[in-house]
Amino acid sequence: MKFLYYTGLFLSLMFSANSFALEQQYQQPIVDLIKAFKNHDKAAISSHIRYPLSRTYPVPDINNEAELVERFDDVFDKTLIKQIVDSNIDTDWDKVGWRGIMLNSGVVWVDTDGKIIGINYQTAKEQLLAKNLIAADKQALHPSINAFVEPILDWQTAKYRIRIDDLGDGNFRYASWSIDKKTSDKPDIVLLKGEIEFEGSGGNHSYTFKNGRYSYVLQVTVIGCDTSPPGWLEVYKDDKRILSQDIINTGS
């Protein structure tokens, strides 16, 4: 999908100047991972993944080994498997500081234990699934916001439901409801012309929407620690932060 492409492109450009050759101590877990793919051993591959494995919204995340085995062909097609199997441990895998180890400028990310933590690739099968889910998503939304090019996120904090959609040409839309309402209800707030900003070289980014003196900021965590929330909502009045809430449900 378009957003996945731009994110992957940004990461590859940023990391090309900040990656380092893979040290000997990290090579064996990668060798084991490559071997599992070479043998097409789904059980072994599923044990080499850090769960939940995020997928591009609205495709649901993969939460455990059983789900990975069931959805294996959705995530890994011949093209991606070939990239992994044919990869050279010395030239195709790079350690990028604390963020982890990447294959081919970020197509696949693994941690230092050799477990996959991210895949910046979408198979044709998963693209079709996403297309069907988006169509169903549009049917379920309030008519005032069911027109968009691509859904970006559907989140919940303790008090709010929040949705961001790409309306095309980089025009992002913010819609929110109180937590007791459904997305089929008319949104309490709708804001247009949001701006996306990438922060540092880790891929974490934010969306900012203006409403007079107020700014609504959605911080998105791409690479964080085990306890990092997927993101959080901040609201500012002028330059003073008046609200900050962690995301507790990603809607996927």
Image (cartoon, rainbow, N blue to C red):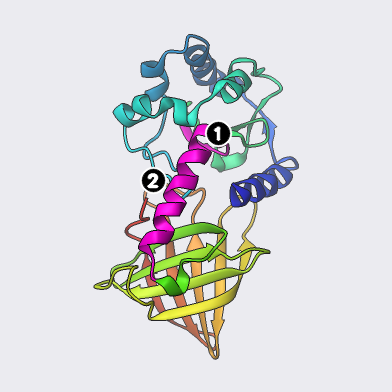
Q: Is residue 81 magenta?
A: no
Q: Secondary structure at mark 2?
A: loop
Under mark 1, the amino acid is: Ala
Residue at the image point whose x is 45% and y is 46% from the top: 132
> Where, by quadrant of the figure, is residue 27 drawn?
top right
- Magenta region, main secondary structure: helix
Looking at the image, can residue 110 be seen?
A: no
Residue drawn where x is 69% and y is 37% of the image: 19
Tell me the residue that label 2 is attached to.
226
| Picture coordinates of residue 103, whole percent (x, y) | 62, 29
From this view, report whether residue 67 is shown above or below residue 242. Answer: above
Q: Which label belongs to residue 124?
A: 1
Q: Residue pushed farthest left?
A: 180
Label 2: how many residues lie within 10 Å, few (<14), some (14-19) or many (20+)?
Answer: few
Residue 132 among those drawn in magenta? yes
Q: Considering the numbered disc 1 on the image, is that residue within a helix, a strand or a loop?
A: helix
83 over 62 or under it: above or below: above
Separation of residues labelled 2 and 1 (CA atoms): 30 Å
The disc labelled 2 sits on which kind of residue?
Asp
x and y percent of residue 187 in the render? 38, 77
